[in-house]
């Protein structure tokens, strides 16, 4: 299995603010884009289209640490956590790393899965059970890299 858990992006002038650094909207854009890139890479988008069950966000926030400038590359690492008490809900934590390998920002959100026809919260479709194995492998790799 070709597991991809990090995504690189180069900051262009469209996301540079009046202060000459990466603007807040850009951090949000690339954080969320990394999740969609993850979903595309692992075939999750096909399952969402087939089952008509997709993710929705209730709450999100960003904490900023280090500046990023135009032309610099960022590394974005999304991590999804299941709610152990209710599989309809999840939390998402995304780290944005700058060119110096320093934490530039952290994004956190809380969400759920929604039946896109009924427009109601629902459980994760069985067709997405393969995603658990992907996340287990990613977290295992994260743990081993800390040693």
Image (spheres, rainbow, N blue to C red):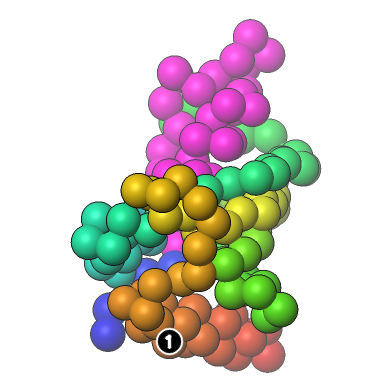
**Magenta span includes 81:** no
Asked whether the viewer can see residue 77, the reply is no
Residue 147, located in which quarter of the rendered image? Answer: bottom right
**Magenta span includes 13:** yes
Q: Position of residue 11 (x, y in %)?
A: 46, 32
Q: Position of residue 114 (x, y in %)?
A: 47, 54
- Circle 1 sits in a helix, a strand or a loop, which is it? helix
In depth, the one of 60 and 8 nearer the eye is 60
Q: Tell me: residue 26, above or below residue 32.
A: above
Q: Tell me: residue 142, above or below residue 31.
A: below
In depth, the one of 137 and 131 nearer the eye is 131
Q: Which residue is mark 1?
A: 133
Q: Tell me: residue 57, above or below residue 26.
A: below
- Please give the range of residues in magenta: 6-34
Residue at x 51%, y 86% (from the top left corner): 136
Q: Position of residue 18 (x, y in %)?
A: 63, 9
């Amino acid at each position: 299995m070709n597991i991809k858990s990090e995504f690189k992006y180069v900051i262009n002038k469209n996301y540079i603010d009046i202060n000459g650094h990466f603007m807040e909207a850009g951090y949000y854009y690339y954080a969320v884009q990394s999740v969609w890139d993850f979903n595309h890479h692992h075939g999750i988008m096909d399952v969402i289209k087939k089952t008509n069950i997709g993710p929705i966000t209730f709450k999100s926030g960003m904490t900023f640490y280090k500046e990023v400038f135009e032309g610099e590359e960022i590394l974005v690492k999304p991590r999804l956590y299941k709610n152990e008490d209710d599989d309809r809900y999840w939390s998402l934590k995304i780290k944005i790393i700058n060119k110096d390998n320093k934490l530039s920002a952290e994004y956190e959100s809380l969400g759920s899965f929604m039946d896109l026809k009924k427009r109601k919260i629902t459980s994760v479709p069985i067709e997405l059970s393969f995603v658990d194995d992907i996340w287990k492998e990613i977290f295992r790799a994260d743990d081993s890299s800390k040693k």
